[in-house]
Amino acid sequence: MSTVKVAISIDSSLLVQIDQMVKEKIFPSRSKAIQSAIHEKLNRLNRDRLAQECSKLDVKFEQALAEEGMSEELSQWPEY
């Protein structure tokens, strides 16, 4: 993974908490702590977005679509 340097402004109380986690060796550095937090937040946002999109689906239509073709005779199904 390629990394680049950025400058950020952060609330001093958050920085104290991050520094404490680094001191306790939860994270090896401030950078890793912040990277981890951003990564976790982005993953959560993506999961929430997927859940929101899934909630828009018509359950009955999706069920019918999934079962489409299942009513064919078993003898017409290919052998595996």
Image (spheres, rainbow, N blue to C red):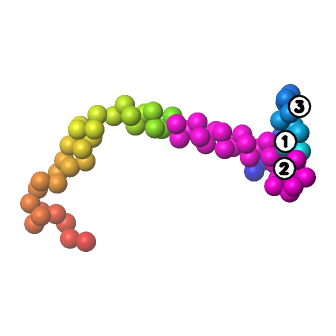
- Residue at image mark 2: 21
**Residue name at image x 48 percent, y 38 percent:** 50
Classify mark 3: helix, strand or loop: helix
Going by the numbered disc 1, the residue's amino acid type is Gln
**Residue name at image x 61 percent, y 42 percent:** 43
- Residue at image mark 1: 17
Of residue 5 and residue 21, the one placed in the foreground of this image is 21
**Residue name at image x 81 percent, y 55 percent:** 26
Q: CA distance from mark 3 to mark 1?
A: 9 Å
Q: What secondary structure characterizes most of the magenta part?
A: helix
Given contact means CB atoms under 8 Å apart, are the residues at marks 2 and 3 in contact? no
Q: CA distance from mark 2 to mark 3?
A: 14 Å
Q: Residues within 10 Å of mark 1 (few under 14, many from 20)?
A: few
Horizontal side of residue 45 vs 74, given as left or right:
right
Horizontal side of residue 79 vs 8, given as left or right:
left
Q: Is residue 7 above or below residue 31?
A: above
Residue stretch rendered in magenta on the structure: 20-48
Going by the numbered disc 3, the residue's amino acid type is Ser
Going by the picture, which residue comes out furthest to the bottom?
A: 80
Classify mark 1: helix, strand or loop: helix
Percent across and percent down for residue 40 are 66, 44
Percent across and percent down for residue 21 are 84, 49
Q: Is 38 part of what is drawn in magenta?
A: yes
Is residue 63 in view from this perspective?
A: yes
Of residue 70 and residue 48, the one placed in the foreground of this image is 48
Given contact means CB atoms under 8 Å apart, are the residues at marks 3 and 1 in contact? no
- Say which mark, if any, is on residue 12: 3
Going by the numbered disc 2, the residue's amino acid type is Met
**Residue name at image x 20 percent, y 43 percent:** 64
